[in-house]
Amino acid sequence: MKIKNMVLLGSTILTLSIVFALGIGFDSYAVSEEYMTVNCRKGANVRRGPDMGKSVKDCLPQGTEVMVVGEKDGWCSVEYDGGAGFIRKDLLTQVPSVVSMEGGEIPMEVNCKLGVNVRSGPGTDQAILGDLDQGTVIIVTGIDNNWCKFDYKGKTGYVYGEWLSETEKEATDLNASTQASDKKSGEKTMMVNCNKGVNIRSDADINAAILGTLEKGTKVKVTDEKNGWWRVDYDGKIGYVYQEWLSEVK
């Protein structure tokens, strides 16, 4: 939910007071002010300190907007509607600045190597209108729960904000471009090739938390790659699998 600008100063003071109470000074904590949203489908735990060993004081559902006022060692000090605390940075996605603009327009570029699907509404359950290659620049005119709205060939289209980055480049002429029938979409199907199965992890790191396991032969949707890992969507979970353990489905 959106945090009102009128509480910005008060919320900053509140969160910084927590930082001081925990003994974290300005010298060791990078102070900032920016909006981010929870990107984990299971939500994100708000802890009383920047450590997995600290107690959980709240859990924010996916799409919740928070104000980040500081960052250290992969943790963000946040303020949200109803409290303040610490959330792991990998569970948050930066909110494009367009969210704070009334009727504004901003160019944004597709950053996903596999491209992205254009949806008819703000959700993965909405119809696919088409797809965009990496590097395509669109003019975002609004946002709905981190889905960016834009004009797609005369229709209103939506792309998830995680796959877009702000840019100063000129917008791509989508109406003039033709798309080949075999053009790759924002996802592809791959299959587990490891006899012992593989773990799905919360991040592209062998030390990241295990979200689940996949048996050999299991098919998953791959939506991006990161540092030698595939970002996968399987059974409602978003996670990462080491690239060596997946093969393309012929």
Image (spheres, grey):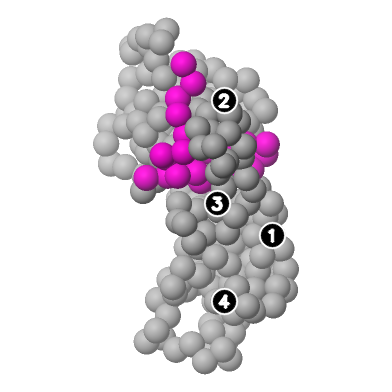
Q: Residue at x 64, y 73 (%)?
A: 47
Residue 73 in view of the camera: yes
Q: Report the residue marked by disc 1.
A: 60
Residue under label 3, please give it: 201
Which stretch did the figure color magenta? 228-250
Cα separation, mark 2 vs mark 3, equals 27 Å
Mark pair 4, 1: CA separation? 17 Å
Q: Which residue is mark 2?
A: 119
Asked if residue 108 lies left or right of residue 48, the reply is: left
Question: Alpha carbon of mark 1 to alpha carbon of mark 3: how far?
Answer: 20 Å
| Mark 1 / mark 3, whichever is N-terminal | 1
Bin the neighbour count of mark 3 within 10 Å (Cα to Cα): few under 14, some 14-19, many 20 and up: many
Q: Is residue 117 above or below residue 29?
A: above
SS of the residue under disc 4: loop
Q: Position of residue 165 (x, y in %)?
A: 38, 43
Mark 2: give few (<14), some (14-19) or many (20+) Cα within 10 Å. Answer: many
Mark 4 or mark 3: which comes first in sequence? 4
- Front-most of 234 and 61? 234
Amino acid type of the residue that numbered disc 2 sits on in the rendered structure? Arg
Question: Are the two marked residues, 2 and 1, in contact with CB atoms closer than 8 angstroms?
Answer: no
Q: Is residue 65 above or below residue 107?
A: below
Q: Nearer the viewer, mark 4 or mark 1?
A: 4
